[in-house]
């Protein structure tokens, strides 16, 4: 559809604008001017976005609202197992949404056990139906896919269900499912393709292994599973698989949750191990093959080298060893866009109207996971996309603030954090200038059912606040492990944005009895050496 309805003559155009201005409808006049001048220069679109994930969709709708003629192209290349999905990107289809719903399935299973201790008379045995859960979750995801398509129509954003790649700096070639190609041009282009899971690079892995792109739509229960990797994706998936009573092992090359606070990461691993997840540390797969039993045989060796080899057989092998950006797939090199050679992510220049999201090519930008050096989080992509659209088409200047972004890891004991890790704080400011307030605690909800249940006993939860002694104990990082940690850290995230100090936390009245109130009562520091395990309520 056209981005504006043209007036029959310049005189009527000027007359209409004067009426708007004299009637104090200046915003209407401004919007009209933008619409009248956009999609000019012989381009098909004012803005074309490659990638229909959370960031691309948010940016497209905001730009269209501001009067731009916008198109979004999105196409999912099937996995080696043939898995595909609809509009919405990784988070909606094969990431945050199905992951948290499967995590919730585990919490409900634990709640059934807890309920008996609270007086509910329930059957002693309980069974879980993987197929029923999977179908319910996929039904919800498909409803979201439909809603996103409908929203694009409502917002007058053109949706192209085709694979897009650069021909030159202003031209994109689209290839649909039938192999039919066409070319379109745009004044401005945003790359929001995100990424896909990496593979190990050894024989048979694509034929025998799956990734998180496949897990949430498996037609049958995964059975005995090996999860290769120690990223948050790996630990979250291993956590809910264990919770659903599948024999699950995590094989990690080095440390868990690289980039996160390592004390908290190790706490998660200990909790998961107490919960039944097995860990093989310091090893990598050396060979993957089909066993005579019909299972998948995995042989592994120590990360540091050597001839020692161990092996076992599994029903499912899940690779969760990281992701790569889809910049080669959309051929950004043809537009002259520079990428980080190690991860293929687009390098932001920090200049121009795009600022952080600005590539080296003036009219090409990047948002979300494809942007080098910034958090790979759905809300980050959404916020960055909206603010970029406002700068490009709304005359605004506000830039995305990538500092102190709160996030959560939905492992069996949830982890919420905002700001820096203890390791990063020490590296930047020096250990002598860092004060860490901390405590372990037990949520009230677990005081009745947790008696005698391994892994859910006293002090299974933990929190700490990292402060800069040379800056009035300014808070640099907040970390919490326990139930509903994501909800807790979302609320405290604003404190870091506003440069809160430890004194501000001390002056805040907590809500009792909650896990969140623990942050308001911290008094024990690590350097004091005092007992930091909590007692009482």
Image (spheres, grey):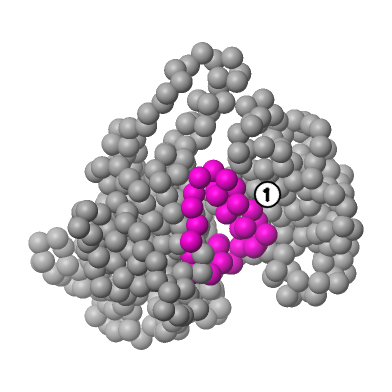
Q: Measuring from the top left, give residue 446's x and y in whole percent.
A: 65, 31
Q: Residue at x 57, y 54 (%)?
A: 269
Q: Residue at x 13, y 69 (%)?
A: 181
User: Which residue is identified by label 1?
Assistant: 480
Q: Viewer-proximal residue, 61 or 441?
A: 441
Look at the numbered disc 1 and give the secondary structure of its residue: strand
Callout 1 crowding tier (Cα within 10 Å): few <14, some 14–19, many ≥20: many
Q: Is residue 432 above or below residue 131?
A: below
Q: Residue at x 32, y 54 (%)?
A: 314
Screen quadrant of the C terminus? top right
Q: Measuring from the top left, give residue 529's x and y in whole percent.
A: 87, 57
Q: Viewer-proximal residue, 331 or 321?
A: 321
Snapshot quadrant of residue 423: bottom right
Q: Is residue 116 above or below residue 196?
A: above
- Asked whether the viewer can see residue 161, the reply is no
In magenta stretch: residue 6: no
Which range of residues does the magenta coloring cover? 252-280
Q: How many marks?
A: 1
In magenta stretch: residue 277: yes
Screen quadrant of the N terminus? bottom left
Q: Measuring from the top left, give residue 413's x and y in whole percent.
A: 58, 45
Left or right: where 502 falls relative to 252: right
Left or right: where 291 falls relative to 304: left
Q: Residue at x 55, y 62 (%)?
A: 257
Left or right: where 227 falls relative to 423: left
- Asked whether the viewer can see residue 131, the reply is yes
Snapshot quadrant of residue 324: bottom left
Q: Measuring from the top left, give residue 352's x and y in whole percent.
A: 53, 78
């Amino acid at each position: 559809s056209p981005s504006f309805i043209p007036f029959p003559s310049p005189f009527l155009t000027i007359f209409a604008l004067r009426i708007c201005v004299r009637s104090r409808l200046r915003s209407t006049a401004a919007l009209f001017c933008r619409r009248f001048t956009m999609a000019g220069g012989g381009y098909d679109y004012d803005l074309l976005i490659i990638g229909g994930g959370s960031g691309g969709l948010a940016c497209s709708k905001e730009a269209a609202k501001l009067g731009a003629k916008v198109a979004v192209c999105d196409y999912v290349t099937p996995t080696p197992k043939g898995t595909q999905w609809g509009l919405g990107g990784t988070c909606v289809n094969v990431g945050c949404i199905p992951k948290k719903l499967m995590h919730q399935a585990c919490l409900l299973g634990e709640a059934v056990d807890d309920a008996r201790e609270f007086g509910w008379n329930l059957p002693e045995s309980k069974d879980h139906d993987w197929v029923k859960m999977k179908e319910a979750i996929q039904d919800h995801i498909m409803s979201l896919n439909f809603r996103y398509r409908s929203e694009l129509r409502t917002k007058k954003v053109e949706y192209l269900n085709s694979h897009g790649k650069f021909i030159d700096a202003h031209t994109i070639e689209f290839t649909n499912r039938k192999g039919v190609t066409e070319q379109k041009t745009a004044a401005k282009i945003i790359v929001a393709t995100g990424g896909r899971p990496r593979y190990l690079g050894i024989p048979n892995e694509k034929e025998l292994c799956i990734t998180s792109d496949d897990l949430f739509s498996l037609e049958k229960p995964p059975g005995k599973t090996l999860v290769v990797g120690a990223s948050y994706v790996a630990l979250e998936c291993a956590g809910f698989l264990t919770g659903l009573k599948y024999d699950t092992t995590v094989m990690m090359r080095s440390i868990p949750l690289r980039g996160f606070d390592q004390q908290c990461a190790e706490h998660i691993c200990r909790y998961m191990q107490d919960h039944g997840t097995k860990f093989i540390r310091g090893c990598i797969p050396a060979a993957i093959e089909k066993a005579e039993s019909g299972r998948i045989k995995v042989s592994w060796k120590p990360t540091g080298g050597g001839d020692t080899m161990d092996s076992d057989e599994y029903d499912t092998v899940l690779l969760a060893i990281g992701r790569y950006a889809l910049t080669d797939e959309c051929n950004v090199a043809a537009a002259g866009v520079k990428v980080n050679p190690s991860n293929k992510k687009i390098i932001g220049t920090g200049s121009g109207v795009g600022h952080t999201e600005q590539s080296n090519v003036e009219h090409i930008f990047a948002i979300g996971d494809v942007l080098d050096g910034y958090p790979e989080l759905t809300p980050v992509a959404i916020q960055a996309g909206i603010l970029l659209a406002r700068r490009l088409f709304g005359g605004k200047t506000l830039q995305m603030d990538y500092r102190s972004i709160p996030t959560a890891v939905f492992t069996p004991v949830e982890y919420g954090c905002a700001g820096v890790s203890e390791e990063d704080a020490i590296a930047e400011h020096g250990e002598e200038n860092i004060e860490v307030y901390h405590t372990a605690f037990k949520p009230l909800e677990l005081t009745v059912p947790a008696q005698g249940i391994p892994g859910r006993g006293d002090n299974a939860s933990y929190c700490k606040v990292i402060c800069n002694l040379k800056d009035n104990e300014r808070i640099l990082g907040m970390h919490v492990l326990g139930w509903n940690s994501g909800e807790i850290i979302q609320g405290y995230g604003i404190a870091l944005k506003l440069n809160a100090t430890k004194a501000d936390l001390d002056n805040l009245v907590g809500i009792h009895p909650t896990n969140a109130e623990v942050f308001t009562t911290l008094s024990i520091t690590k350097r004091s050496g005092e007992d930091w395990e909590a007692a009482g309520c």
